[in-house]
Structures are given as structure tokens and as C-alpha cells.
Image (spheres, helix red, strand yellow):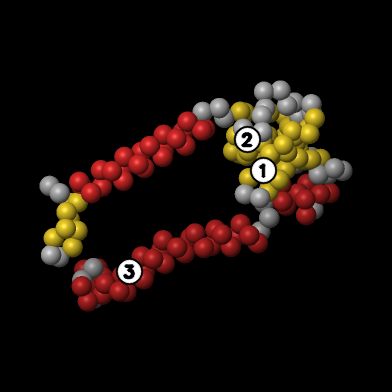
Amino acid sequence: MGWRGWFSDTNKARTRLVLLFLLLGPAAYWTFLRLTVPVGYPACVRAPAACDGDALVLSLFRVDRIDGPERYVVEKGFSYVPIEGPTEGLSVGADISVGGAFRAEDLVVVASWRELHVLRTRKKVLGLVGLALLGVAAPFLVRRTPTGWVLRA
């Protein structure tokens, strides 16, 4: 059987299973690695002495709380990271990226730079508007035939 046999009607179930595996396999593998292999701040918390002074980058985290003029906590996916650095211009709920060094004695990241993502909310809204427009336009892009759905010409 050549490559054409994979796309024939007799092998439809096998082709769908292979495509489903190719789609879900990498996602399942990534999820397994994410849950079992600590990387970044969680790895430093598990072995603080080995990570003391290591550079960490926390990309697109959300400010969870501000504890004082030089201390705040960011979170992403139930991972809370204490940061020591300036808090001016920050508000709870703001999206930021932070880079700094891990300090083992109190398990905190000492920020050397910080970027506030002020347009992130607008980007999310723009994505939702595009998704809504696609939902409105989709019924006009396809039509039902006796053999299935086809794109309108």
C-alpha cells in the first residue's frame, strides 16, 4: 500500500487514529514533562543551594499582590514567585515579564529588569473579536451537500 492507501475510504479510521496521535502525542508529552520535570523557579525551590545566583526569566506573569515598596508576588498557572524589586507603576492584575537572579536564603528573585505589558489586554480583546467574526462568517463559508460539508466557491 502506497501513500494513497492512507487516504482511501477503507483506511479512514486508521488515518484518523494516526492523525489524532500526531496531534495529541506532543501535547501529552509536554504536559508530562511540565508536571514531572521542574524548570526555572520550581527547580530552584527544590534545590536552592544549587541555584543560588542563577539568572531567571519569568515571561508573561501576572502580578498577584504587592507586599511593600520593594516586594511583590507574580503568578502563572498556580505558580507563585516572590520578587524583590521596585513596585512603582505596578498594579494587581498587570501582565509583566521579570528577569533577575535567584536568592537561595529567602527563595526570592531579585529583579534586574522588568517589562510591563500594557497592551496585552487589548491583544486578548482583538483575538476574541477575530474569533467572534469567524463564528459569524463560518456559516457563509461552507455549505452542506449529500456527501458532507464543502467550501463555497
Q: Which image quadrant for residue 23?
A: bottom left
Query: Residue 92 in the image: x percent, y percent?
Result: 66, 33
**Contact check, label 3 and label 2, Cβ < 8 Å:** no
How far is the residue under mark 2 from the one under mark 1? 10 Å
**Mark 1 residue element:** strand
Residue 50 in sight from this viewpoint: no
Query: Residue 5 in the image: x percent, y percent?
Result: 22, 72
Q: Which image quadrant for residue 137?
A: top left
**Mark 2 residue element:** loop
Q: Earlier in the sequence, mark 3 or mark 2?
A: 3
Residue 121 in sight from this viewpoint: yes
**Contact check, label 2 and label 1, Cβ < 8 Å:** no
Seen at 54% across and 58% down, the residue is 30
Disc 3 vs disc 1: which is toward the camera? 1
Q: Amino acid at mark 2?
A: Gly
Q: Is residue 4 left or right of residue 94?
A: left
The residue tagged 3 is: 16
Disc 2 vs disc 1: which is toward the camera? 2
The residue tagged 2 is: 93
Seen at 16% across and 54% down, the residue is 143
The residue tagged 1 is: 75
Q: Is residue 72 above or below residue 86?
A: below
